[in-house]
Image (cartoon, helix red, strand yellow):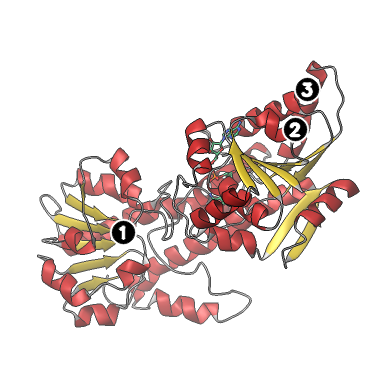
Amino acid sequence: MNVAVIGTGYVGATTSAALASMGHQVIGVDVDRQKVESLNCGRLPFYEEGLEQLMQNLLATGALTFTADLPRAVRESDILFLTVGTPSNADGSADLRYVEGAVRDIGRSIKTHKVIVSKSTVPVGTGDLVKTWLQEELAKRGTDIPFDIVSNPEFLREGKALHDALHPERIVIGCESDKARAVMTSLYEGLRTVLFYTTVRDAEMIKYASNAFLATKISFINELARLCEKTGASISKVARGMGLDSRIGGQFLRAGIGYGGSCFPKDVEALLHLSRQEGVPLQLLDAVARVNQEQAAWFLQKVLRHLGPLSGKKIALLGLTFKPGTDDIREAPALRLIPELLAAGAELSAYDPQGMEAVRRLHPGLRYAKDPYDALAGADGALLLTEWQEFLELDYAQVKRVMAGAVLLDGRNALDGEKMRGYGLLYDGVGERGTG
Ligand code: NAD
């Protein structure tokens, strides 16, 4: 099938490559000409394992191309995916300006029937807005071209984006015509997964509900971790014991410094905004967001307890991105901690395998190390802020040797506390027994 993917960021670039590798003819479209140029040269403007190589192969076969020429992409495609960003407005609501911009561009260009599929995360009711924007543009042109609207929310995880796009656990398809349903069914024919058909509104809500639920698990375990720490229980053991119950499940129950990234914080806020707008307060979700906001400050108190006043103290930061496997630093918990540590007078030395370039733009004054040991050299304390595999495999005897002090605070509960103490490190995690 001929597909255009409008917006070639994390989701759009991944979707383009995944669909092309499934045998479709794909054109990725972006308003950012530099990005288009880089993609056409086979250079991914962000880090995602395996994606650049696949993209290069697909560019070579001609199954995938990129352009800034939206009218051409619309002309040559039957299915148009919307994968533009939906960031937060100041009041927490979803900013739909990129969606509207892309939809109106489509409305100015279409000449034949199209299936317009939103993969962008958008609040319930946006499908109707998309219809209205298109009809307005068509009315301006004095034409009446038929189209179908589909909501097909994306659930991929950065760091595992390609795997998730090619092996999704489910594909949610919100559509309201047999024609659109048939088109979406054959589009995804090559994937062995569950296709869950529903209405556009249901599909839009499923995405927010899923992210809100995962964020709830994280805040639940983080808040409980604080109580575990006071009462001498270990949150890691508690979470494992809970997770063995299949009704609960073990995922998203690792205590740490809070959730971040380009999705959870903004999607939770957008759902809360919608709930206020509709007069149906979501009290539980409100607390989820609050707990998450507090978690970095709670961890900072731990840093102060272990290191005392931070003025002039050297602190090594291991990890900056919001999670491993990505260079994305949007809403990364490390970014909540850095200003606080700097304000307290700490001297920071940071290392991250992928995130340093982006953080350097925000905090040019930090010392950016060439490797983890370089970051740790002479440090009074070390904070593990992103659980990159590289950090889990360090030689911790050497870590102890290169540091001036011995405090190692694990903001991701990713290291083995007993082992770390065996190296002579003053290890503490989040919500672990007797280390507070
Ligand atoms: P992104 O910011 O990385 O990319 C968006 C792209 O859209 C940019 O390249 C931008 O230049 C382009 N764009 C903006 N307006 C355009 C227009 N009119 N025409 C063509 N291109 C345009 O965003 P992202 O992280 O890929 O997220 C996209 C959507 O997917 C969001 O709604 C997000 O919530 C959702 N989502 C993201 C993830 C994730 O892990 N990043 C996962 C699931 C869902």
Is 418 situated left or right of 169 in this image? left
- Residue under numbered circle 1: 299
- Name the residue that disc number 3 marks: 136
Residue 75 got which mark?
Answer: 2
> Is residue 41 or residue 2 the one in the foreground?
41
Determine the secondary structure under disc 3.
helix
**Residue 282 in view of the camera:** no
What is the three-letter code of the residue carrying label 1? Phe
Q: Which circle, 2 or 3, is nearer the viewer?
A: 2
Residue at 80%, 23% (x, y): give it: 138
Q: Earlier in the sequence, mark 2 or mark 1?
A: 2
Nearer the N terminus, badge 2 or badge 3? 2
Front residue (pair 149, 4): 4
Disc number lying in front (2 or 1): 2
User: N-terminal of the two: label 3 or label 1?
Assistant: 3
From this view, report whether residue 256 is shown above or below residue 46.
below
Q: Is residue 421 visible?
A: yes
- In whole angstroms, how far apart are the C-alphas of marks 2 and 1? 53 Å
Work out how far the residue at label 2 is from the one at label 3, CA to CA, in angstroms.
20 Å
